[in-house]
Structure formats: structure tokens, C-alpha cells
Amino acid sequence: MLGALLALASAATFGLNNAAVRRGVLTATVLQGMAITVPMGLPLFLLACLLFGGFHALSEFSTSQWWWMASAGIVHFIIGRYSNYRSIRAMGANLSSPIQQLSVPVSIILAMIFLNEVITPVRILGFILVMIGPAIMLKRKKGAGTQKSKSGFEPQYAEGFLWGGVSAVAYGASPLFIMMGLESDGTMVDSIAGGLISYSSATLVIIVLILVLGGRKYMTGMGETAPKWFALSGFIVFFSQIFRYMSLAIAPITVVVPIQRLSPVFRVIFGWLINRDHEFFGFWVLFGIFLSMFGAILLAMSTDIVIAILPSSWASFLQLSWP
């Protein structure tokens, strides 16, 4: 239960984070935003390690654990975050939400391959619904023609879908890296120490990238508001990530990842409160989000719960599993 609650807290803060990012990328580049949000996590995780004893756990990490956690940081905070920001900039947070749900099948498939997870009829239905969400968005696009938000923003679907797909793969793969880094006996303190490694590796990469692009000169021209939104995002996403790492330490991927995919609900809520003039809230957008979110719930739901809800005649079919 605690793992599920931590995953839900991660989903809520991640939804708020995306709303803040949406405002930031209106006047700044994606890398400018990452140059603020990624390094911000490092001192915050240092403080968390100091408070919870993470440095002792860090000293007991093996070389392979360091490698897995560093890889998780680069995959999630560099590749995943960059792609997510690009998708949000191209289409807005709401339109990119159903594509993000594709990270759930990626995580489940990797868990099946490397952690001996199984696939069931309920999960197959969840896969299908998660895949239908983006297709619903395409239906909206074809049926509605070119549309703009109240502020005049026009979504770039090709760019948004491309980068949204890349971010889904990266976000879907990183939980496996974290689980491999925590190993079978990882604790929540270990997860905080792992988060510090992940943020450290990602921060080094982003510093090198910014220096190559021109350093301080590259960071100018963001305007007055974008740095504030990115700073808020960096603070919020720290809590999202610390909840995520802690939940993965005490709950399986197949529970944590789908619950985290409830973040589109919070994206819509915070998007309406903060970015209503820069987002789309039409029927097909919300319906696509609902279907993909429901699919994510089915991926996390126990087969026993579904059997208890449906007629007993379905039990033999629902209990099938592969491989």
C-alpha cells in the first residue's frame, strides 16, 4: 500500500511539473529548461541523503549498482526529459499525455523479459487501451483540421508524436535500470542514494552540453518568466522523483509504473488551472487521456480483483497467463 501511495504522489507532482514546464518552454528552449531543472535535483538529493542516511548506503553500493543508477539518470533525466519537454513544446502537455502512456507497455515488456513478469488477458486489454489513446488523438486531428488554442498556439503533431515516443521508451526503460541498481534487497534509503547517483550523472551530462553550446551566453534570452517556471519545475520534480525511487524500492514495477501513469489526470487539472489558454481540452483529447489512463490501471490491477468483479464464468479465461 505504501508503495502505491508513493507512486500516486509521484504522479500528482509530475502532473504539476508538466504544467510548470509548459509555461517555461513558451519562451525558452528545451535545453535551457533542462539546464535549470536537472542540476536543481542534485543539492536536493544531497540534502535528502544527509537527512535519511543515504551516504552510508552509498558507500555500500557495488560497482554494478553505481552503473545501473547512473544509466537510469542519463536515460530518464537526459533522454526522457529532453524528449518529454520537446513533445510538450510541440503539442502541449494535454496532447502529449496519451503518448506518454506508452511507457507502461515498455516497462511491462522489459519486466517480463528481465524480471520474469507474466502477461494476462487483463494486461493485454490494458496494452490495447494504452495504444488506442494516441490513435484517438489522431482521429481528433483528422476530423478537426488545423486548430489553435486560445493563445494562438498550433500543435505540431509530427514533432510531438516523435519526441513523445522517444520519451515513452526512455521513461519506460528507466524503472528497470533502477530496479537492477537496487537489487532484490534494496531499501528506501538505498533508493535515495541511487537517486543522488542518477542526478549526479545527468547533471554532468547537461553541464557538458551547455558548455559546448556556449555556456552562459546560451542561457541568455529566456525572458524573465521562463527561469521562474523552470525553477519551480525543478523543485517539484525533485519530489516526484524521490517518491518514484522510494516506491520502486518497496513495490514491483508492474504496480508503480501504471499508477504513475495517472499523472495525465493531474496534468489536466493543473493545466486547466495554469495553462488553460495554451492547452487543448476538447472531447477527443480528454477521451484519449481517459482510455490510456484506464489501460494503465488495468495493467496494474490484480487479476483476482477483476475476477471478483466479473461473473464467475470469466474466471478460467482471466486466469490464463503467458509465458
Image (cartoon, rainbow, N blue to C red):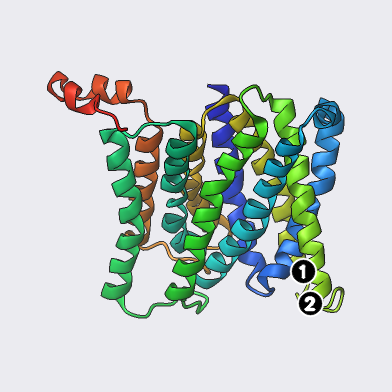
Q: Is residue 231 visible?
A: no
- Residue found 29% across the figure and 48% down from its top: 128
Q: Are marks 1 and 2 in contact (CB under 8 Å)?
A: yes
Instruction: Give the residue displayed 45% in from the left and 48% down from the top.
Output: 106
Q: Position of residue 185 (x, y in %)?
A: 65, 21
Farthest left residue in view: 313
Q: Nearer the viewer, residue 144 or 168?
A: 168
Q: Find numbered disc 2 in the image and state the secondary structure of the residue it sits on.
A: helix
**Position of 239 compared to 163: left or right?**
right
Please state, as top left, top right, bottom left or bottom right, where the C terminus lies in the image. top left
**Res. 70 mark:** none
Q: Which mark is residue 209?
A: 1
Hey, what amino acid is under mark 2? Leu
Q: Mark 1 and mark 2: span between their CA atoms?
A: 6 Å
- Which residue is at 24% across, 22% downward? 307
Quadrant of res 39 = bottom right
Rate crowding at label 2 as few (under 14), some (14 to 19) or many (20 or more) other CA atoms within 10 Å. Answer: few
SS at mark 1?
helix
Q: Can you see residue 210?
A: yes
Label 1 amino acid?
A: Leu
> At which x and y percent is residue 145?
32, 79
Residue matched to label 2 = 213
Q: Position of residue 12 (x, y in %)?
A: 57, 42
Q: Is residue 93 above or below residue 256?
A: below
Q: Is residue 303 left or right of residue 64?
A: left
Q: Quadrant of residue 25?
A: bottom right
Name the image quarter holding residue 205.
bottom right
